[in-house]
Image: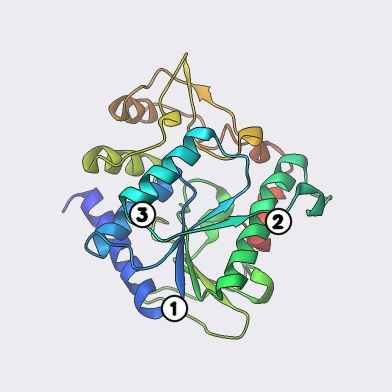
Amino acid sequence: MDDLDQLEAQSIFILREAYRKLKPLAMLWSLGKDSNVMLWLARKAFLGNVPFPVMHVDTGKKFPEMYRFRDEYSKKWNLELLLGDCPPVEDIDPTLPPAARSAARKTAGLAAMIDKYKLAGVIAGIRRDEQATRAKERVFSPRGAGHKWDVRNQPPEFWDQYATPHEPGMHVRVHPLLSWREIDIWRYIEREGIPLVDLYFAKDGKRYRSLGDQDITSPVESNATTVAEVIAELETSRTSERAGRAMDHESEDAFERLRVAGYL
């Protein structure tokens, strides 16, 4: 087995463990490259049919290309798609910096969906290499009452044994891509032929390396128009993957405050 085979096998094992242990269960689908890889892995894990719903927590500010992709592939892949709205920014903590406050709408929207469907588990496509706060996560990460994440009190995970607490008001976030790197994601996309929103490929010397809301996401300079060219670019790039995310350039603790409160 090569590196991609090992990552794939580990992720499929995690997805099957989540399905076995956590019910009801749902998967977050943000329409970005990571969540598309995660969804592809779920289809592999369960013989082509995803046996749990996928949720899109919609801020109403995604790119038109993302909505078109969602509508096309939710039908092609026969997904049970759950849509949830987010509250207006005026309802969000005013002490957060502007971009983080806008992003926090998604935290509230996700919490509402978890409560509505009484979910015991939520599968999310975060990676440790993407952002320092995410590096503190576990594969099966319990969230307390009110969806809070206690970063200082997480269960140990030895020999691929994952804790699934069932205390009142709790749920578990499951992270099957936690050990993947950005370049692993792209190499797997190339190997498997996974479809993507075309904003990831350069037009007029720019492309999006990370996709979010239109008002808080910017493209980076790039001439990569194919998956192979993106991989070649990443092999030499020293720019952060989230360089185009506005909230990553705000106060140092803003992202961790969002994560502790239940952000993705």
In primary-sequence order, the first of circles 2 and 3 is: 3
Where residue 20 appears, as percent x and y from the top left, is 35, 78
Asked whether 172 or 80 is in front, the reply is 80
Query: What residue lies at 33% left-to-right and 43% top-to-bottom?
Result: 184
Which quarter of the figure is the C terminus placed in? bottom right
Disc 1: CA contacts within 10 A as few (<14), some (14-19) or many (>=20): some
Query: What residue lies at 52% left-to-right and 62% top-to-bottom?
Result: 137
Type of residue at label 1?
Lys
CA gap, disc 1 to disc 2?
28 Å
Asked whether 48 or 201 is in front, the reply is 48
Residue 23, numbered label: 1
Type of residue at label 2?
Arg
CA gap, disc 2 to disc 3?
28 Å
Q: Are marks 3 and 1 in contact (CB under 8 Å)?
A: no
Q: Element at badge 1?
A: loop
- The residue that disc 3 covers is 39
Q: Residue furthest left?
A: 1
Drawn side of residue 48 relative to residue 164, left or right: left
Asked whether 96 or 115 is in front, the reply is 115
Q: Is residue 230 above or below residue 49?
A: above
